Amino acid sequence: MELITVSRRQGLAFSVRLRGHEILTDMSPAEGGRDEGCNPVEMLAGTLGPCLAIMSQRFCDARGYRDGDVAVSLTAELADDPKRVMAFTVDVQLPRDVPAADREELSRMVGSFPIPATLREVPRLDVEFT
Amino acid sequence: METTLGGKAVEIDEDGFIQDPAAWDEAVARDLALTESVENLTEEHWKVVNYLRNYYLEYNMAPMIRKLCKETGFKLKEIYDLFPSGPAKGACKVAGLPKPTGCV
């Protein structure tokens, strides 16, 4: 993976740059920011959504299901001590011509998609402050 | 802080959640809904509100969102269509539940 850099714009707004793309993150005014971008927790949820969407769309494309597009709605439930995401609730809307058997197969495959698999296996986190 | 909801004085926190669950009634719910940009509580709104309130009164906690969806029959997006702030900050507030935990 190429290097991801995060640099301050102003206040609590930070720019995330990777492979020529840029994403702006910030906190809400209630949290001391100016809401100029998604906050990091929202970005985490936003990462899960596209992963599920892309993998599901690939599945549907491979099987020729074309009566509609894949769409995802999701939200995160939060907890304290420590502050964290305690649950993601995700609805994945599939093309209308996907039969029940394939919906069930996708349900079984979800755990092997990159982001869900990462959330399940909990990667090592190595942070050094300089 | 104190405010008027449903025609009576009610204590709320900085985010508008009522502090005493016993102070809730349907008139309070209607005024709380206005603070959530919900002008009129429809039968669908009440289905969500009543489920949340009954669950809270029985278990002293809010249900997980998936359970809310399953028991009310609404998809996640439909819950957000009814309560734009979402099931935690929006629907739970209107139902008179305590503010949900978490940071953002």
Image (cartoon, coloured by chain):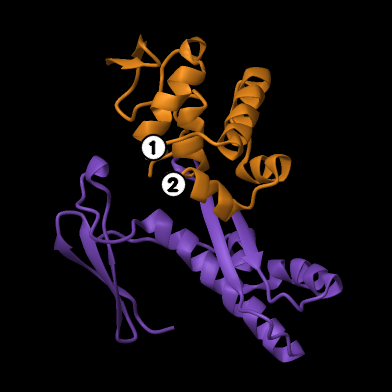
x 64%, y 65%: residue: A92
Horizontal and vertical percent position of residue A9: 15, 65
Horizontal and vertical percent position of residue B42: 55, 36
- The answer to whether residue A80 shows anywhere in this view is no
The colour chain A appears in is purple
Q: In the image, is A67 to the left or to the right of A124? A: right
Identify the disc placed on residue A108. Answer: none
Q: Are marks 1 and 2 in contact (CB under 8 Å)?
A: yes
Name the residue tied to disc 2: B84
In the image, residue A8 sits, relative to residue B16, either above or below, namely below
Amino acid at pointer 2 = Pro
Q: Which is nearer the eye, B33 or B16?
A: B33
Q: Mark 2 falls on what kind of element?
A: loop
First reached walking from the N terminus: tag 1 or tag 2? 1
Q: Quadrant of the N terminus of chain A?
A: bottom left
| Local crowd size for mark 2, using a 10 Å CA cut-off: few (<14), some (14–19), many (≥20) | some
Amino acid at pointer 1 = Glu
Q: In the image, is A21 to the left or to the right of A57? A: left
Q: Which is nearer the eye, B28 or A124?
A: B28
x 48%, y 67%: residue: A47
x 65%, y 85%: residue: A58
Q: Mark 1 falls on what kind of element?
A: loop
Q: In the image, is A42 to the left or to the right of B25? A: left
Name the residue tied to disc 1: B36
Q: Which chain is orange?
A: B
